Amino acid sequence: MSWKVQPISDLCLHSVDCVNRTAPVVEEPTPYKMIRTTNVKGGFIDTTNVRYVTLETYERWTRRLLPQAGDVILTREAPLGDVGRLTSDDRVFLGQRLFHYRADPKVLDSGFLAYVLQSPRVQGWIRGTGMGATVEHARVGDFHKIPIPVPPLKVQTKIGGILSAYDDLIENNRRRIALLEEAARLLYREWFVHFRFPGHEHVKITEGAPEGWERLPASEAFEVNPKTPRNDEGIIRYFPMAALSETGMVIGRGPMEEREKSTSVRFRNGDTLLARITPCLENGKTGYVQMLEDGEIACGSTEFIVLRQRRVSSYYVYLTARQHDFRENAIRSMIGSSGRQRVQPNCFDRYFVAVPPELLAKLFDEAVGEMFDQVGNLDQQNQKLSQARDLLLPRLMNGEIAV
């Protein structure tokens, strides 16, 4: 099937580059959120892991175009060609290296636009415009000219509806994952930070821990960078730093590679991965490994610290690693040149955790273990939904499937 091809700017009410300078941010959350290239991925825009600005900055940075639900964002650099569609009414604005499209509803469905930009044909054109030996980027002018195949508007709407059904399920699962993780973190803080565990009314706190508990350095409660032997024959999965999230436990499969040789950093299901280098640690990059096959060993970036259960469960280890004061303790130990500072392993000798009696530990693990399992199941569902959508997308865009 042959569809007419037109430049994207002819099909949009607006096609606008971002303000190409850094907006001044503030520490405390505000209603005004900055979207960066890291927020734009796979058709989605993450509006939770953001930086914040004042109203004055927000108004200055949105004077060209005020983002609204349905708008499509494209990354122009680092990386080139990632696509996301705004689905909320959050007050967001574009950081650097982003391009902003608003479809003309008379000729172009906004959902179709988000998906056609992800199609192999259009992605190939975008990547063909890339320049730069170190950081691939595209000229602003090229992003006005992207050739878009344009079926009739009714066909566009149907294609967008079919593919968005998958993405709606994925997004719903992501919300459930976030709620489950937040529930696990709240329970951890309630029991092990505020010491409001079952029966706490009858237990005294002495020397920083309830009576009957142990207060141990993290280096004794956890295994830090444990040796994980593996038969070096055969392919091994490798996860780079990009696979770790700044906000949640799920480790991304997208950046995963298959290698013939392992790095020195190896891990298995139940391990926690913690970034040891600046600024990844400060930004919160941490993950819980539960996406591997039974018995599988994977490897990762040499900038990972691997934490493994010893005196406490794997759930306890991960939830501790997500604590602000745990990360601050690690940050204070960093040494090295500016921009390449790394955590020193002896910092875990100076961070103490409260280890509960066996019965309380079992009750906690049963409660949060169900939450972790649900997160793992939802993540697997999302992987299957993404694969099904990605198989359908090029066939719909090529007209191979009649709608």
Image: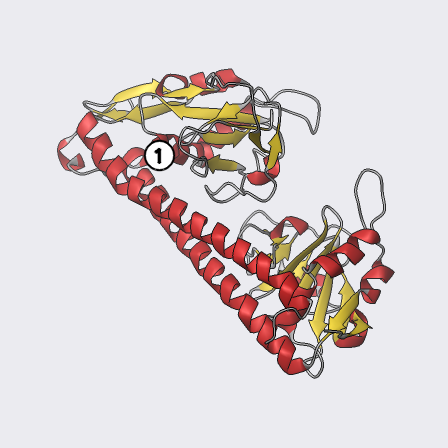
How many numbered markers are drawn?
A: 1
Query: Residue 21 location in percent, x, y?
Result: 78, 52
Residue identifier under label 1: 315
The residue furthest bottom is 106
The residue nearer to you, when weighing 245 against 55, is 245
Figure check: 17 above or below 352: below
Residue that appears at 64% across and 72% down: 110
Name the quadrant containing residue 335: top right
Residue that appears at 69% across and 29% down: 339
Q: Are there few (<14), some (14-19), or many (20+) residues within 10 Å of tag 1?
A: many
Label 1: state its secondary structure.
helix
Query: Residue 158 location in percent, x, y?
Result: 58, 76
Tell me if 251 is positioned left or right of 117 in this view: left
Q: Is residue 280 visible?
A: yes
Residue that appears at 42% across and 32% down: 269
Figure check: 27 above or below 352: below
Q: Is residue 204 visible?
A: no
Query: Residue 32 location in percent, x, y?
Result: 59, 60
The residue furthest left is 202
The residue nearer to you, when weighing 326 against 307, is 307
Query: Residue 324 location in percent, x, y?
Result: 46, 36
Figure check: 180 above or below 151: above
Name the quadrant containing residue 68: bottom right
The residue nearer to you, when weighing 219 against 166, is 166
Which residue type does callout 1 highlight?
Tyr
Figure check: 24 above or below 107: above
Tell me if 97 is positioned left or right of 51 in this view: right
- The C terminus lies in which quarter of the figure? bottom right
